[in-house]
Amino acid sequence: MFSFFKSSDKTTEPAKTEEKQEGWLQKLKTGLTKSREKLGGRLTSLFSRGKIDEALYDELEEILLSADVGVTASAKLIEDVRARVRKERLSDASQLKDALKGALGQLLTPLERRMDTGWGAGLGPPRAIGSPAGATKPRIIMLVGVNGAGKTTTIGKLAKWYQAEGKSVLLAAGDTFRAAAREQLMVWGDRNNVTVITQEKGDSAAVIFDAIQAAKARGVDIVLADTAGRLPTQLHLMEEIKKVKRVIQKADPTGPHEILLVLDANTGQNGLSQVQIFDDALKLTGLVVTKLDGTAKGGVIAAIAGTRPISIPFIGVGEALADLRPFSVNDFVEALIE
């Protein structure tokens, strides 16, 4: 038996004015503290070394690897920095800072994407399953990831984000394996004053299918579908998540319109493995990188750009609703390399 959990009909509070950009940058810098500890002091020392030579490049590569940038991305960054040094005829190590920022920005640029909230706006991702042009409601966003990555919390924040964009939202409690996940999603539904479609026990795909049908009947703009957490090594569970995608396509042949992997930034290089396996199974359209909260090594984002450049529409730096923001390459680079 499916149930429709609807929060009280209280009037949604007006969205608060967004924090000033300086405040967001400070939060991002705080979130990347661990990475700057790995990079900052050593880079400062490196940039004061004097002339640019092979030993300097070797040390720079070692510093990047220590910040979880990964072998492939580190090699690409070093190659780009070398090219900039030659082109701009740089000779002093102090001049490398801007070269490194430029190289990192260029590497990360393909990851920056604003998620489409309008139909026919032409802003959809290049890897999107269903084209937004002429699409009918609802827009179906499926969220996947391992346990503890922050899927349910991210759904609550995305619901608030889309509401601020003027969209109506419905939540599908597709994590039927954890009662706590269902209850947590209901709390987010109440907080955002949106309907949550849930089922105490049963099939995740069936819950999401029912949510899509309800959204169509009500003219809802966005369906945010939670799914059960799973490890990439659990092959039977990966087959189940593929089934969820197939069932969504039965409910709407153009969907899911987004498949987002919620990735805990604290997992480091293991996060890169998650990206590769979930992408192979589902053809991800984007990532939401969470928990850039002071302990994470933000270099994993560069590692993703270097090996599997899937867009990152959002990053999270805390628990508050305002702590989920669109990923900005310029902001990220400035926060990582001061």
Image: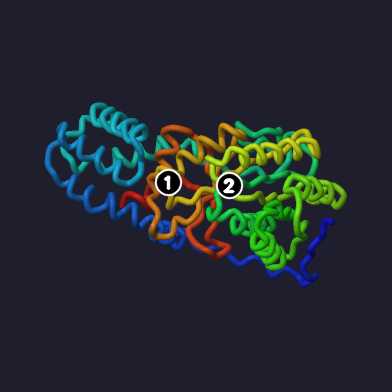
Callouts 2 and 1 close, C-beta under 8 Å: no
Give the colour scheme of this rendering: rainbow
| Amino acid type, label 1 | Asn
Residue at numbered disc 2: 230
Q: Can you see residue 223? A: yes
Q: Quadrant of the N terminus?
A: bottom right
Whichever of labels 2 and 1 marks the residue nearer the N terminus, that label is 2
Spot occupied by residue 61 in the image (x, y as percentages of width and height)? 26, 37
Indicate left or right for 88 with 125 as reference.
Answer: left
Q: Residues within 10 Å of mark 2 (few under 14, many from 20)?
A: some
| Amino acid type, label 2 | Arg
Q: In the figure, 332 relative to 27: above or below?
A: above
Residue drawn at (35%, 58%) of the image: 33
Residue drawn at (55%, 65%) of the image: 320
Residue at numbered disc 1: 330
- Which quadrant would residue 59 be assigned to in this image? top left
Q: Nearer the viewer, residue 169 or 242?
A: 242
